[in-house]
Amino acid sequence: MTRDTVGPTSPAGVRGASHPGTLAARWLAVALAFLLLLGLLGSSPAIEPEAAPETRAVWVTRWACKSPQDVTVLFSNLAEIGVNTVFFQVRGAGDAFYRSSFEPWSEVLTGTLGKDPGWDPLETAVSEGHRLGLQVHAWVNVFTAWQVTDAGEPPPVTQPLHIVRAHPEWLVCDRARKPMSIKKSEARDNYAFLSPTSKGARDHVKKVLKEIVLKYEVDGLHLDYVRFPDSCYSYDRESRLAYLRDTVHKEIPYSQWRRLKLTEFIADLSRSIKKTRPHASLSAAVMQTIETGRNTYYQDGVEWVRRGYLDFVVPMIYTPSLSFFGTRLKAYADSVGAHRVVAGIGAYLEGFSDTTLVAELKTAKAQQVRGVSIFNSDHALLHSSAVQDYFGYQRP
């Protein structure tokens, strides 16, 4: 069959008509189409996808805002110096800074655990943040159960009942099977922790965090204290029995098992969050040294990012030493990719100057990481001129 016989129908309705004008027109059409395909007829050049904006974040602690007016003023001040992302703390130690179905209102808001403050801090933060063009990520302490005190008093009776009262068996235990103390003189940390290897504790936390993402239009969920208190914990009975069951056919060290269980928790949480609010990011504040996080606290942040469970990590490289800061940051950037790292800067440190802050901001920029987060909002504002100048932000 000749090339002409498969051409379009001619005006006379005869397939394969070979009128010279028709052939010339067809060949011209083919040539024009080919040139258009190559973009040679003056078409606009391909538009490169817009790069994600640099993350310019601060952590806003749970003590920063005692009223809606506090949120309004603080967020306005942060926006003025060029901040575009806020990690807003909504869970400290089994308590809530939002209307929770599972945990009591924080006593920070009213002086009484469980007392309704008459306003919703997270709802206010999301509303004000979005009005100002800020991303608002709900910042949660994951496994901290209760803040230790001199007297070591447990939480009072509330509705809902605080987790330490409802399930004291979910606290981490040391090698002697002794639960972590809530008395300051006996404690190894500022908090008593829930056991990351207790199924009940993990399920409770996942339920709490899913509700936040379900009820509030947050731009992300930011995890803190997503770790063990240290390698001496948790030897609680439930965890030891679970370890024996899991290792019947394959013996692995208890340290490795704890790390794997924590990774399993992150994987489950990630699936739940992405299903509930697909466009919300999931991130974690992690130890400043990869090896310390992985081997002492069983926090395998690098693996969590590599597997896609986290969108990014925020290593808390709180130091005035520029060389230490740069080395630790590079280790994370080399391990997971610079675009998956937001550098945590400890501006709260005593003697932390504008010069030090700007030097660390420049180091993060030079390493082309995703962005920076300053701890905390109060100290970002104390260094407001340096922050604003560095971000190149101009007031409207």
Image: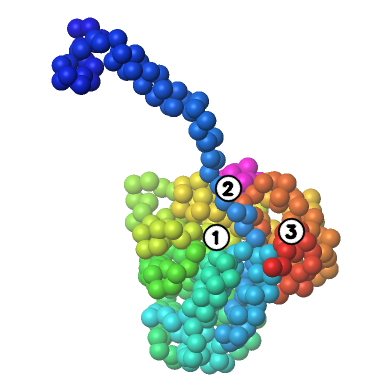
Magenta segment boundaries in residue numbering = 331-341
Residue 7, how many percent across, how many down? 24, 17
Nearer to us of marks 1 and 2 is: 2
Q: Nearer the viewer, residue 374 or 305?
A: 374
Q: Residues within 10 Å of mark 1 (few under 14, many from 20)?
A: many
Q: Which residue is the site of mark 2?
A: 51
Q: Is 87 displayed left or right of 216 in the figure? A: right
Q: Could you tell me if residue 107 is visible in this image?
A: yes
The residue lying furthest to the top in this view is 2
Label 3 amino acid?
A: Gly
Mark with earlier residue (1, 2):
2
Position of the N terminus by quadrant: top left
Image spot of residue 307 (x, y percent): 46, 47
Which of marks 2 and 3 precedes in the sequence? 2
Residue in front for this viewpoint, 182 or 203: 203
Q: Main secondary structure of the magenta part?
A: helix
Side (left or right) of 328 relative to 159: right
Q: Which residue is mark 3?
A: 392
- The location of residue 121, given as percent across then percent down, is 52, 81
Question: Which disc is residue 284 wearing?
Answer: 1
Q: On screen, 179 above or below 345?
A: below
Residue type for callout 1: Ala
Q: Are marks 3 and 1 in contact (CB under 8 Å)?
A: no
- Asked whether 245 falls inside the magenta stretch, the response is no
318, 383: nearer the viewer = 383
Return the x and y of residue 116 as percentages of the image width and height: 47, 91
| Element carrying mark 2 | loop
Q: Residue at x 73, y 72 (%)?
A: 381
Q: CA distance from mark 3 to mark 2?
A: 18 Å
Q: CA distance from mark 3 to mark 1?
A: 27 Å
Q: Residue at x 40, y 58 (%)?
A: 278
